[in-house]
Amino acid sequence: MTSRLLADIGGTNARFAWQAGPGAPVTDATTLACSDYASLELALRAYLRRLGRATPRDCAIAIANPVLGDHIQMTNHEWSFSISELQTNFCFDKLRVLNDFKALALALPMLSTDERVPLSGGSALPDAPIGVIGPGTGLGVSGLLPDGQGGWIALEGEGGHVTLAGRTPRERQVLEILDARYGHASAERAVSGRGLVALHAALEQLDGGNTPSSDIDAAGIVGAALTRHSDRCFEALNLFCAFLGNVAGNLALTLGARGGIYVAGGIVPRLGAFIGGSPFRERFEDKGRFSAYLAQIPVFVVCARQSPALLGAARALDMTR
C-alpha cells in the first residue's frame, strides 16, 4: 500500500497524521503550533522527524484558505507556499491541497453517531443537502450535495466572509463598531475566536470602557461566560451564538440543507449546554416566512476524537486515483 502524510492546517494549529494506505486507519495524529515554525514545509519536516519515518509518496493538505492556484497565502496566518515547489521539495508522487472545510465536508458521512451530537431541530432527510459551519481561528463554511448516484459533492467556498446582519439595536451598534474597525463586518469578524474577542471589545466600547480587556482572549471570555464571572463575557458569548445561528440559518436556506447543519470548529464543542440556552436556535429560525421550514432542519455539533478534516483529506486522495 502507498502510505500518506495528512495535514489539517488552521490559523493557529497544524494537525498532522499518517495513513498506511487507502482505507487504512488514520494514525499518529500530532498537533503543532503554527507560530513555532516559519513555514509549512518546516512543520511538515518536524512531524516526519517526530514520527521517525521517511517521506511518503502521497500527501494531502487541508488548509484554512482558498485554493485558487499554485500559490497559497494564508488568510489568518503568515505562511505562504507554492504547491508545486512543496511537491518537488518532498518528492511527493501526489500532493492534494484543498480547503479545510471542503475536507471536513467530505468527512461528514464517515463520522460515527457519537461524533455528531444532536443540538436541536427535526430529523435529517436522507439524500438531502448538508451544510457545515465552524468557528475556530476563522469561520469555515461548506456543504455536501448529493450526486444522484449515492455519493456526495463537497463545496469549496468562503462563506465565512459574508456580510453579517444585526437583528437588535444592540447588535447593530456592535456591527457598526466592527465595520469601522475592519472596513467590513463579515461573519468571521464576530463568529470566530478572534471575533469573540472583537465582540467583547465592542461591548466594552459601548459601555464606556470601564473594564480593561486588552489581555483577555477567547478562552478567557468563554471561561468567564460559562461560570458567569463576567456579565460582559456572558453577553459577548451570547452575541457570538446569536450571530452563529443567523449565519447557519442563512446557510441552511441557501443549500436547502434538509440533511442538517453541522457545527464544527474548536469553539462550539467546548460550550456544552450553553449554546442550547443561547439565542442560537431562535436566530437560526428567525427568517420570517421560512421560519417553519427551518424549524424542521436539525443541527448537530461535531465532536470528533480527531480532526475530521484529516479523514476528508484522505478521502480527497482516494477521489483523485
Image (cartoon, rainbow, N blue to C red):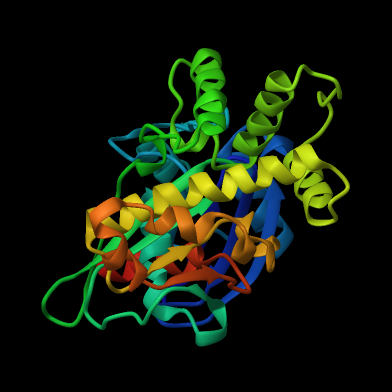
- Tell me which residue sits at (38%, 59%) in the image: 285
- Tell me which residue sits at (81%, 33%) in the image: 216
- Tell me which residue sits at (38%, 49%) in the image: 97
- Residue 260 x, y percent position in the rendering: 36, 71
Q: Judge by depth and name the residue closer to the eye, 114 or 66.
A: 114
To which quarter of the image does residue 199 belong? top right
Point out the image quarter for the N terminus.
Answer: bottom left
- Residue 298 x, y percent position in the rendering: 40, 73
* Numbered marks: total: 0
- Residue 319 x, y percent position in the rendering: 26, 68
- 137, above or below 52, in the image: above
Q: Is residue 100 visible?
A: no
120 horizontally vs 37: left or right = left
Residue reaching furthest bottom?
Answer: 113
- 19, above or below 30, in the image: below
Q: Is residue 306 visible?
A: yes
- 299, above or below 203, in the image: below
Q: Judge by depth and name the residue closer to the eye, 1 or 18.
A: 18
- Residue 31 x, y percent position in the rendering: 69, 56
Residue reaching furthest left?
Answer: 148
233 horizontally vs 259: left or right = right
Q: Judge by depth and name the residue closer to the eye, 52 or 221.
A: 221
23 horizontally vs 127: left or right = right
Point out the image quarter for the C terminus.
Answer: bottom left
